Amino acid sequence: MTKAFVLLLVLTTALKGFYIEPQKDGKESLSPFVGVWDWKTESSSFSVRIGERNDSLLFTMGGVFYSGNRIHSSEWDEENKALQMIRIKKQKGRIIKTKISEGISSWIYNENRANNYNDISFELLNDSTMRFTLDDSRSYWPDTAIMLRRDYTNTDFSDQTYEHIYKGK
C-alpha cells in the first residue's frame, strides 16, 4: 500500500510539470504561449516574444548568430513597441503552426526571397519549455531549438507590422 501511494505521489508530481496553466491578465486567461522565450549556444542566441491582443497572438523575434557575424534584431516603433512579424488567431492546444517570411533571415542576401513563406511551429513542452521549428534550411536560424521561458510578459505590440508579415488564415 505504501509503495503504491509513493508511486502515485511521484507520478502526480511529474505530470504537474507537464501541465500548462493559463496566465491570468485581469478576468481573461492569456494564451500559455504569451511571454519571452530564449535559446542560447556558445556562439548564437535568439528570443521570441509572443503577445496577445484581442483574439490574436502576435510574434516578433531577433537573434545574434555566429558570434555576432549575423544579427537580426526585433524591430520596434518610435514608441518602443514591438513590430508584428507574425499575427495569427489565438489557438487552443500546445502547438501553433503558421508561416514566416524568408526575409527574417535572408533579406541581406536576396530581397526576392522575402515574399516566400516557410512553415514555422511553436510547441509547448511544458510551462517553461517550448520547441521552435523553422522549415528553412537555407538560413542561419536554427531549424529546431528548445527555448526556455524568460518571463510571462504580454509584450505591447505596435499597430505597425514587419514589412513581410504573415497574417495567418
Image (cartoon, rainbow, N blue to C red):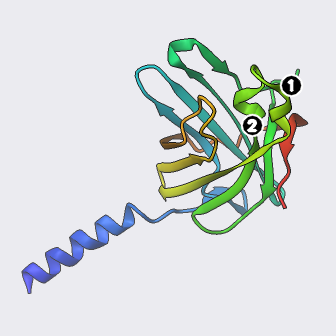
State the residue position of label 2.
Answer: 102
Q: CA distance from mark 1 to mark 2?
A: 22 Å
Residue type at mark 2 is Glu
The answer to whether residue 9 is visible is yes
Q: Where residue 52 sits in the image (x, y, percent)?
A: 75, 51
> As displayed, is residue 156 above or below residue 76?
below
Taking the spot 48% from the left edge, 55% from the top edge, the residue there is 127
Horizontally, residue 150 falls left or right of residue 92, namely: left
Displayed quadrant of residue 36: top right
Is residue 74 or residue 149 the one in the foreground? 74
Instruction: Please name the residue that numbered disc 1 is placed on.
Output: 77
Q: Measured along the vertical axis of the image, is residue 32 above or below residue 82? A: below
Q: Is residue 55 left or right of residue 122?
A: right
Residue 44 position in % (x across, y down): 50, 23
The reply to whether the C-beta atoms of the residues labelled 1 and 2 are less than 8 Å apart is: no
Q: Is residue 63 left or right of residue 28?
A: left
